[in-house]
Amino acid sequence: TMSTEGKVDCGRRRLIIATAAVGGAGAVTAMVPFLSSMLPSERAKAAGAPVEVDVGSIAPGQMITVEWRGKPVWIFNRNQEMLDTLPKLEDAVADPKSEVKQQPDYCKNPTRSIKPNLLVAVGICTHLGCSPTAVAAGSGNPSLPDDWPGGFLCPCHGSTFDGAGRVFRNKPAPTNLEVPPYRFTSDTRLVIGDEVA
């Protein structure tokens, strides 16, 4: 016969197993927020992560806005008439050759872009950080001259920029609009915040 010392107390064993299981589940539950706190937040990822954009559906003369590092970035598909206007404005803009470092070296050209038709620019005025708006030529805007060639107007203090984001002379904005680093991954996709390979 078995003595009482040799008998297994099944109830006690079940209690120990159940306690260990609940404790293990509690430990895992406590670890998830801890481990999650070690991963970068969505805000932190957005603060520096590149943004990929499909530009294939942007019609000529149309502009879209995306967010990168908490800033509005314009992607403007300039039509041929807009591109033809840019060389005619060199005497009217303050920095026609983009000498002030407001763009990557590969965008230091007359269109301030990789592909001539696509302007990629941070939509923040270089004066006090207001957001300019696109205004087409012949819009009849009373804040603009009758011969306005099209471009961007900052309504806060009247700074104006041409279709390449170059600031017109004698305006409050000291420099051209910023062109962020970007590159194309295909004919219709670009990545903002990533340099040309």
Image (tube, rainbow, N blue to C red):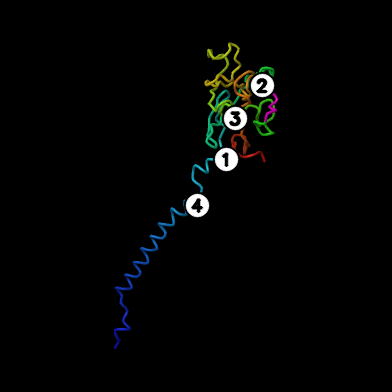
Q: Which residue is mark 1?
A: 50
Residue 172 versus residue 33 in the image, above or below: above
Q: 80 or 2: which is nearer to us? A: 2
Residue sitting at the far top: 146
Residue 90 horizontal/vertical position (percent): 69, 19
Circle 1 crowding by C-alpha within 10 Å: few under 14, some 14–19, many from 20: some
Are the residues tagged 3 and 2 within 8 Å (C-beta)?
no
User: Position of 5 compared to 140: left or right?
Assistant: left
Q: Distance between the Cα atoms at labels 3 and 1?
A: 15 Å
- Identify residue type, mark 4: Met
- Identify residue type, mark 2: Ala
Q: Secondary structure at mark 3?
A: strand
Work out which quarter of the rendered image holds the C terminus and state it: top right
Residue 14 horizontal/vertical position (percent): 32, 71
Q: Distance between the Cα atoms at labels 2 and 4?
A: 47 Å
Mark 2 / mark 1, whichever is N-terminal: 1
Are the residues tagged 1 and 4 within 8 Å (C-beta)?
no
- Identify residue type, mark 1: Pro
Q: Which residue is mark 3?
A: 121
- Identify residue type, mark 3: Ala
Q: Distance between the Cα atoms at labels 1 and 4?
A: 21 Å
Q: Which residue is mark 2?
A: 94
Segment colored magenta: 96-100
User: Position of 67 compared to 171: left or right?
Assistant: left
Mark 1 / mark 4, whichever is N-terminal: 4
Residue 190 horizontal/vertical position (percent): 60, 36
Q: Which residue is mark 4?
A: 38
